[in-house]
Amino acid sequence: MAEITLKATTGRELGSGPSKRLRADGKVPAVVYGLDADPIPVTVEWRPLREALTTEAGLNALIDLDVDGTVALTIVKELQRHPIRGNVLHIDFLRVSADAEITVDVPVVLEGEAKAVESENGVIDQVLATLSINAKPADIPNEISVDVSDLVIGDAIRVGDLKLPAGVTTDLDPEDPVVTAAFGETLEVAESDEAEGEAAEGGEAAGDAAGAEAEGGDEG
């Protein structure tokens, strides 16, 4: 995995007001911590940050963070976005060691065409969108590929079936499903039953509310 260099500066004011002014000026407030060192509030420019996070590695990109001339290997630990506009509000950089494993979430990408499932009007359900893995920084894959070509109705690909790259492990239960194949009607019936159950609960709640109002009226 290629490393990216990103410059950061210290000395920013803390608080929502100063942070808002930074963002208006095309900058992002951040903090860098980890490896038993004190957390340092920093500022990064938005454009270089966007370039760093839009490589094939995504949020798992290895970033050589240059903080006022001192460079540390980091990875994005947390990224906060505005709930509506989607712009980055704050970012946490975690210092990492090239020789120590870290735990990150990696996208699970389905490959191939499950023709046997399609021929029976079945559906492929991706249960896991990401996989939590353990690996040294340089061994972190961009994604975990899962071939669904041989799936038939009733099949499932589980965590234990995945072919992980060298140096990569996961702590998830090997029996946890990653992808399942089922009849389309089965899925629709399950969703319909769930909807009917919610509607029934709503009706009972409405009836209880009406009864409470009636009792209140009698008391008055």
Image: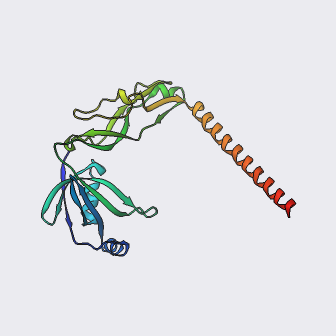
Judging depth in this view, the residue of 208 and 80 nearest the camera is 208
Quadrant of the snapshot with the C terminus = bottom right
Q: Position of residue 88 (x, y in %)?
A: 35, 62
* Location of residue 195 by image quarter: top right
Furthest residue toward left: 69
Judging depth in this view, the residue of 190 and 71 nearest the camera is 71
Q: Position of residue 129 (x, y in %)?
A: 41, 41
Left or right of residue 15: residue 140: left
Judging depth in this view, the residue of 127 and 119 nearest the camera is 127
Quadrant of the snapshot with the N terminus = top left
- Residue occupying image coordinates x 30% and y 71%: 26
120 shown above or below 5 = above
* Location of residue 177 by image quarter: top left
148 shown above or below 100 = above
Q: Position of residue 145 (x, y in %)?
A: 33, 35
Q: Which colouring convention does the figure follow?
A: rainbow
Left or right of residue 162: residue 96: left
Judging depth in this view, the residue of 185 and 59 nearest the camera is 59
Q: Position of residue 149 (x, y in %)?
A: 40, 27
* Number of numbered discs: 0
- Residue occupying image coordinates x 26% and y 51%: 55
Left or right of residue 201: residue 61: left
62 shown above or below 139 = below
* Location of residue 178 by image quarter: top left
